[in-house]
Image (cartoon, helix red, strand yellow):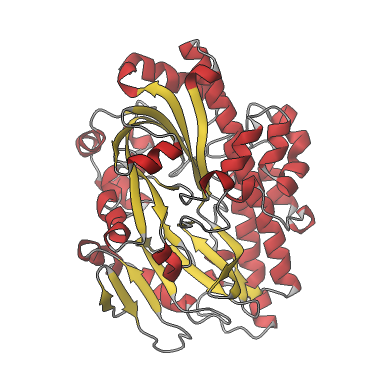
Amino acid sequence: MRLEPVKRNCYRLPCTGKMRVEGLVYARPRLLSDITEDRSLEQLAQAAELPGVVAPVLGMPDIHEGFGLPIGGVMAVTEEGVISAGAVGMDINCGVRLLRTNLAADDFDRPTLRALMNSIEELVPTGIGKKGRHRGTISQLFEDVVHEGAEVVVAAGFGRQDDLEVIEESGYLAGAALKHVSRRAVKRGTGQLGTLGGGNHFIEIQRVEQVFDELTAEKFGIFEGQLAVMIHTGSRGFGHQICTDYSRSQVKAAAEYGVDLPDKGLACAPVESPAGRNYYAAMACAVNFAFANRQVITADIRQAFGQVLKMSENEMGLEVVYDVAHNIAKWENHRGQRLLVHRKGATRALPPGHPDNPPAYRDTGHPVLVPGSMGTASYVLVGTDLAAESFYSVNHGAGRTLSRRAAARSITREEFEAGMGEVLYNTRNYRDVVDEAPQAYKDIDQVVDTLADIGLTRKIARLRPLAVIKGKD
């Protein structure tokens, strides 16, 4: 695939073959070699072949090969277009939540950090297939949760009402209908609320290392030297099974509606067809589940901190800065059109003054949370008016350069420990998490600066990991 320079850090993927629209890829020159070594550009071009797609299909700076749409891909379609499970992703509403504290990170020595990690792990199960501690209570709320989102678990005592005011979509995506979800998906999801999962999911205790915009940071409640907590997880086995089910059924649906699929990974159905509406309703269930999952984990982290520090929540803070979704399809207004924007490994970034910002962030733009790898920095950003060209979308993280298998095969203990430095991690065997080593990811500073350099985002703060909890696959 051939990329043509458009402007600084921006390249055009020209229309070729069956492409209906062109693509745009954002990357600093140092990142281009990673993009051209896998199938991500080919996958982006295939997405541009789908009916109803709106120019351009987009590759974010963290783009890498996925299933269907590349991870770090954005695809918007009209009401006459299609909806694709593969363009949303397996982990529906995998997302990030940031908690701020009233505490200074320098007051936490390694034994205290380790005690916090142990306390959190006692309350939040980690790893693939684990069930939550609250399943006796929450299992009874499952149907309400998937239809109404985070508000249900807040009402049940997991968090505060004001948490909902700083979650994307207020923690609830309308249109969910459990009747369009398979029994297998329900079985996998029941009991998993309040669990972290494996893979790239994490709970990270961080230090605010640098503030770039003091005025905006103050409005976000962020200050240099502050202790913060970042949560990265999604809809667990529930969302994974929904994507699996509909990725299969949409192959048949595409054939029924005469859609010429460029790849089975982009299986799809017309948005307004029964098959398309059913997938949206099922996806919304997983979106709501994931918002509620991060809400329950938040409540458990507050409890864990209280147990270790012997402080009240008012003293500690642990307030939600924001919660953003990464893998989702949502109806939004762009360029005078109502569009269904698929973001897969990408996050929304609304500028100051945009009416879809929550009231607390109407004047600043909502916080955009971009985690790095388990040994590197994470960022808080905001979008700008220039981000209209990307459907107000930015990258969701650093982006992989090595597959999990390649990382596990090639990264030695010495390399892993060098990459982690002084960061604490929650396993004695580095093999449990080596596939998430910093060496398996792109340089987060290069990725973030790609869009900041050209004014699509503004950097607000950089956070460094002190301790990270991850689950074993």
Q: Quadrant of the N terminus?
A: bottom left
Please give left or right for residue 275 compared with residue 125 in the image. right
Please give left or right for residue 54 compared with residue 469 in the image. right
Please give left or right for residue 284 compared with residue 117 in the image. right
Res 39 seen here: no
**Marker count (numbered):** 0
Q: Residue at x 23, y 66 (%)?
A: 33
Q: Quadrant of residue 118?
A: top left
Q: Residue at x 73, y 30 (%)?
A: 156
Percent across and percent down for residue 151 are: 70, 39
Please give left or right for residue 145 compared with residue 455 in the image. right
Percent across and percent down for residue 352 are: 46, 55
Percent across and percent down for residue 19 are: 45, 85
Q: Quadrant of residue 124?
A: top right
- Seen as rendered, the residue at the extreme top is 310
Q: Is the residue 258 above or below the residue 306 in the image?
A: below
Q: Is the residue 260 above or below the residue 101 in the image?
A: below
Front one among 353 and 458: 353
Percent across and percent down for residue 434 are: 33, 40
Q: Is the residue 156 above or below the residue 343 in the image?
A: above
Q: Residue at x 73, y 46 (%)?
A: 148
Q: Residue at x 60, y 36 (%)?
A: 163
Res 78 seen here: yes
